[in-house]
Amino acid sequence: MSNAIETSIHAMGGHARSAARKLAALDADEKNSILQKMAASIRKSARRILRANEKDLAGGREKDLPAAMLDRLRLDEARIEDIAAGLDHVATLPDPVGDVLDAWDRPNGIRIEQVRVPIGTIGIIYESRPNVTADAAALCFKAGNATILRGGSEAIHSNLALAEALDQAGAPGHAVQLIPFTDRESVAVMAKMDRWLDLIIPRGGKGLVETVVSEARMPVVKHHDGICHLYVDAAADQEMAVALTVDSKTQKPGVCNALETLLVHRDAAAGFLPRAAAALRARGVELRGCDATRTMLADVAPASEADWDTEYLDLVLAIRIVDTLEVAVSHINDYGSHHTDAIVTRDDAAAARFQREVDSACVFHNLSTRFADGGEFGFGSEIGISTDKIHARGPMGLRELTTYQYRVRGNGQTKAPVQ
Amino acid sequence: MSNAIETSIHAMGGHARSAARKLAALDADEKNSILQKMAASIRKSARRILRANEKDLAGGREKDLPAAMLDRLRLDEARIEDIAAGLDHVATLPDPVGDVLDAWDRPNGIRIEQVRVPIGTIGIIYESRPNVTADAAALCFKAGNATILRGGSEAIHSNLALAEALDQAGAPGHAVQLIPFTDRESVAVMAKMDRWLDLIIPRGGKGLVETVVSEARMPVVKHHDGICHLYVDAAADQEMAVALTVDSKTQKPGVCNALETLLVHRDAAAGFLPRAAAALRARGVELRGCDATRTMLADVAPASEADWDTEYLDLVLAIRIVDTLEVAVSHINDYGSHHTDAIVTRDDAAAARFQREVDSACVFHNLSTRFADGGEFGFGSEIGISTDKIHARGPMGLRELTTYQYRVRGNGQTKAPVQ
């Protein structure tokens, strides 16, 4: 059994490599036309996909999956239309492949061009949301990559039905493949298969990411925590600071770019904190604070060391009063997850310093942390938000699913003089 | 013992992280001044370094190291001056940190800048050449990164002496640290230390690279084989093709961008191969060929499947006659190492197709493969040549030792309407 899974997944890897060569040769129009056919095929297969999804839901109810997970798993006609519309949308995005990133001439007459090309083959490992099957495949495909998808066991019937629909759209064979095995071993096999996969992207909880990071031989681009900070500077516009705090914390608290820790300059605290606390509490936010915060606000639970390290993903906010911008920066660099951190200030020099010294993918000035998102950045669509520093950092769109090659033209230059 | 090594290396990791924050805040002039002081310190410490090197050489002779390895290990006054001059040279290179890679405004008024920043902390694991201690540290430092170096046991005394000299140049403490342990365990500890190292670069043989790739939790940028090809097209200028073949194969056969397999279009073979063979044999090159090659050239040993897969790094060349450009491209993609491959042709359409379809870091037209090199590309200096596709591909200079962050400025925008 174990050997059969490995053989089967390796065969898919070989197919993916061949498909990648064909995909690299497609032009934007060909890819867009296939994406539109994928969308049409998803719409046409809606009833079959819904029947498959009903099986997954029944299995989930049997296993007593929590309601939130069942909701992530659930497809309906509107969600299927969203998936199809997403494919149509990716077809409208500019194709990054072939862009010349840089070009220069050398004194010896050779001309160097750095040209954007597909990465090749990408493995995506994800959990319960079946829409990832289509969303991730579409982005990888548009960037010219072959994809091997490995979804969670809860959604296997939905995923297989979606993959079958994608497969009927005239893409080169094996452009998008779904691994039919959902045991843990299939993840391990993928992670070791660096001959066939150029990149692996885990999309899921900490356990999954940890497994992939430990086992992968190929590069991994991953999303870890989003422990995002907002620092209210001494020179903040306090009304703006209240609005940004409330928005960053409460507009959608369960996502990675939501605010988790609020840092407040001592000089701003007396004016800002009572107003912010009232606005936050009006929206049901539980506050936990440092000692200084607790002397200023009533009914604030003490924040422990663990709070600074926690991604609540909930209506809870940790608050610390700091003496200087330097302390705020150190706190963020020490406890943060290098995702998104914001400063609110009217002082441009303070903002510049904050943005230069905070070691995070996104550093914002006078803006809600919720704007750290491929859509808000104008990428059209995103495959995720990387908290890694290598290859892609922050929101990842189509460009981040490509690499480059050097195309160099000479006229017979040799290193040694020709004799 | 084992635990002591781990504790000690982890402490170095924590120091590196702190140093990286200080390095990120240095401007180009400050970094350049320190690099010049490092060069001066190396020159001033020359006698101490040479004494340390003599210990390593004595140890190497005792262990009966091969002459080539002893030569790589050997320092003399000229080599120490080269190391110092290399540091001075890095000081003259443009600082990539702070470059704005892209900038745009969103319809809601926020402005996004993608700015080049240091990666942070980089681990370099290398083998016998002590000059890597200074070369790698200088490039990482110039790009604003803190470095943890782990060299081979053969060169430990030389490396310690070089690191001590670098340490006396006024860089922020722990900017460059050398691990004093040379057992295998220290590599494993580094490879697992993703909290403290953002990137690891193995520079050495296959065994070392394999160990690092298997064990590393953080991203690895590596150099695998250089199985480089030259394809002589039907429309090649045959005189140029001979010159490029000879140069690619013989100008320096022991390096990664030297030619290993020659592919010749059937229509070019009769005119080209006898001239090429004569020129190659005049330089002592042993030829191994496919059946078609052997019918055309006398005294050519048969090339087996293993030859297409081999990086000879020696005066040996495998030759295959192909019917079409497509077959040449497939051969390169199937057997090559995605390093550097060249086409010789007067047909620009054939060249464009070759460059688009060959999946290698460097694809050359009418140029010796030996130009695949950071120096020849104008990078000033290189940390290595990546055969990975992620983050950095091909020659890696200072730019490839950086990442980016998004600095975004708003004026109070929130996702939810402010109430």
Image (cartoon, coloured by chain):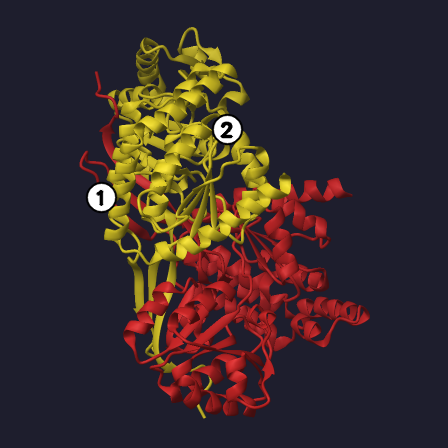
Chain colours: A yellow, B red
Relative horizontal placement of residue A83, taking residue B288 as reference (left or right): left
> Is the C-beta separation of discs 2 and 1 under 8 Å?
no
Q: Residue at x 52, y 62 (%)?
A: B37
Instruction: State the image coordinates of residue A405 (x, y, percent, origin top left).
Output: 38, 61
Return the mark for residue A92. 1
Height in image: B408 above or below B122?
above
User: What is the number of callouts on the image?
Assistant: 2
Q: Which residue is drawn at 67% across and 59% down?
A: B160
Q: Which residue is drawn at 64% across and 53% down?
A: B211
Cα gap from disc 2 to disc 1, whole angstroms = 32 Å
Residue type, label 1: Thr
Label 1 sits on a secondary structure element that is helix
Q: Are marks 2 and 1 on the same chain?
A: yes
Looking at the picture, tell me which residue is in the foreground, A183 or A48.
A48
Looking at the picture, tell me which residue is in the foreground, A372 or B25.
A372
Height in image: A111 above or below B109?
below
Relative horizontal placement of residue A308, taking residue A410 as reference (left or right): right
Label 2 sits on a secondary structure element that is helix
Instruction: State the image coordinates of residue B297 (x, y, percent, origin top left).
Output: 53, 89
* Mark positioned earlier in the residue sequence (2 or 1): 1
Instruction: State the image coordinates of residue B96 (x, y, percent, origin top left).
Output: 38, 56
Relative horizontal placement of residue B1, taking residue B131 as reference (left or right): right
Examine the rendering and report whether any part of residue B144 can be seen. Answer: no
Examine the rendering and report whether any part of residue A97 can be seen. Answer: yes
Q: In the picture, residue A82 is in which quadrant?
A: top left
Query: Can you identify the residue that label 2 sits on?
Result: A153
| Quadrant (top left/top right/bottom left/bottom right) for the C terminus of chain A | bottom left
| Quadrant (top left/top right/bottom left/bottom right) for the N terminus of chain A | top right
Instruction: State the image coordinates of residue B368 (x, y, percent, origin top left).
Output: 43, 78
Height in image: B289 above or below A215?
below
Return the mark for residue A296. none
Residue type, label 2: Ser
